[in-house]
């Protein structure tokens, strides 16, 4: 039999490429730094073994009301193909996204509860029977976190927390039961953003989004400090501020401070953007769904060393590198930017 030699795969990092030492668009990350980031982001130890993580259950809802509204607005009709297509993801497609989001956030999915709703419950979002079913499932699997594939209103989230933690509330948190956390889709994505943000601008923007999200969800935790007495002497003391009012004021001040810091960072971004325009190089962007392989393409072409893993939102901070093509081209050099991926219902 004739033996056909098989050539080894080409290593993209071994390709001949001319690198200017004064060109700061080429930035090589240390291998230890890349491995450390991978361990932190994938919740693994130095041996690649996944660390023990928090368990949760997932509640998925198919809202038929939104589909009826879309049908009335004639969003089902596609003028190009002439076929009728749903305007939003199906329940199973949305659940697949949520499973990946849960894994990326470092949670372990222990069970699922699904329901098709004609009308959303204004108090608990899902029906009361499904709430009890979810509560029973959490007791069976021994988890303290429930994730909803929806954006809950502050009132719905508070009602669900009161139902799941009724025993704690009735005993003034003196019993040994663990507090159950209610997390919606927006909170889960923001938590992933908070874990993956690396640059100063990214951390500031995530911090601002978290404060904007928490502002209408503040609750009065210290019932024994209902009012703080105001200063001014006998006969001049008013009721003062409640603890909730103090919390709201602190969050409001923090939001103002974060917006000022972000404005300063954006001014620096503007300067860098002007510098790229003055260079006269074409600027290209890698755009697509999250976890589609955009970072892998950037690493292949530029040796940027950004994290490229099979997980959602592995890239949260845009990265720009210069690409130098070999041979005769109209534009032998151009700037390539890796962007944050798309996902449905992105907050």
Image (cartoon, grey):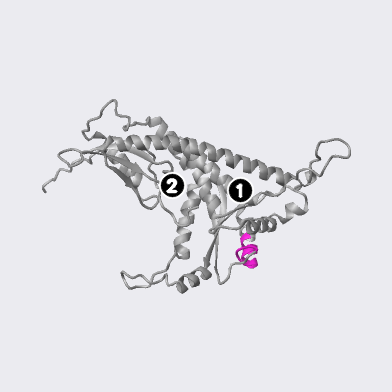
Q: Which residue is disc 2 drawn over? A: 313
Q: Is residue 68 magenta?
A: no
Left or right of residue 228, residue 16 in this image: left
Residue at 26% across, 27% down: 20
The residue nearer to you, when weighing 243 against 272, is 272
The residue under the point 29% across, 29% down is 23
Q: Residue 31 is drawn in which quadrant?
A: top left
Q: Quadrant of residue 61?
A: bottom right
Which residue is under mark 1? Answer: 214
Q: Is residue 69 above or below residue 268?
A: below
Upstream in the sequence, badge 1 or badge 2?
1
Q: Which of pointers 1 and 2 indicates the residue nearer the eye? A: 1
Secondary structure under the numbered disc 1 in the rendered image: helix
Residue 45 seen in the figure = no
Q: Residues within 10 Å of mark 2 (few under 14, many from 20)?
A: many
Element type where label 2 sits in the image: loop
Q: Residue furthest right?
A: 234
Residue nearest the viewer, comparing 48 with 293:
293
Bounds of the magenta span? 123-134
- Residue 152 appears in the figure: yes
Residue 282 x %, y %: 27, 42
Residue 342 lies, in percent from the top left, at: 41, 52
Residue 196 place in picture, x, y as percent: 47, 41
Residue lying furthest left: 2
Judge left or right: residue 265 versus residue 276: right
């Amino acid at each position: 039999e004739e033996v056909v030699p098989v050539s080894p795969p080409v290593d993209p990092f071994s390709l001949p490429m001319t690198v200017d030492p004064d060109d700061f668009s080429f930035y090589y990350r240390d291998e230890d730094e890349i491995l450390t980031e991978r361990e932190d982001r994938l919740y693994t130890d130095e041996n690649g073994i996944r660390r023990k993580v928090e368990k949760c259950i997932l509640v998925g809802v198919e809202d038929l009301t939104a589909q009826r509204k879309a049908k009335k607005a004639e969003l089902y009709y596609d003028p190009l193909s002439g076929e009728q297509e749903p305007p939003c993801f199906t329940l199973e497609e949305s659940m697949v996204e949520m499973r990946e989001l849960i894994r990326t956030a470092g949670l372990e999915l222990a069970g699922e509860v699904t329901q098709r709703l004609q009308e959303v419950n204004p108090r608990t979002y899902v029906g009361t029977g499904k709430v009890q079913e979810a509560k029973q499932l959490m007791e069976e699997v021994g988890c303290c976190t429930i994730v909803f594939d929806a954006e809950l209103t502050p009132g719905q989230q508070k009602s669900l927390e009161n139902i799941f933690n009724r025993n704690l509330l009735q005993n003034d948190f003196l019993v040994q039961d663990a507090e159950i956390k209610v997390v919606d889709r927006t909170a889960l994505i923001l938590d992933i953003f908070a874990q993956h943000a690396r640059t100063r601008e990214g951390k500031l923007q995530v911090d601002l989004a978290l404060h904007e999200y928490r502002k209408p969800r503040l609750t009065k935790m210290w019932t024994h400090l209902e009012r703080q007495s105001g200063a001014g002497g006998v006969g001049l003391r008013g009721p003062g501020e409640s603890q909730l009012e103090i919390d709201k004021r602190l969050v409001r001040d923090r939001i103002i401070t974060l917006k000022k810091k972000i404005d300063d960072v954006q001014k620096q971004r503007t300067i860098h953007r002007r510098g790229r325009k003055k260079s006269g190089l074409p600027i290209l962007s890698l755009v697509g769904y999250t976890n589609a392989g955009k970072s892998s393409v950037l690493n292949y072409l530029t040796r940027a060393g950004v994290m490229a893993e099979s997980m959602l939102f592995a890239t949260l901070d845009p990265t720009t590198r210069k690409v130098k093509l070999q041979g005769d081209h109209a534009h032998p050099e151009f700037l390539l930017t890796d962007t944050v991926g798309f996902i449905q219902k992105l907050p």
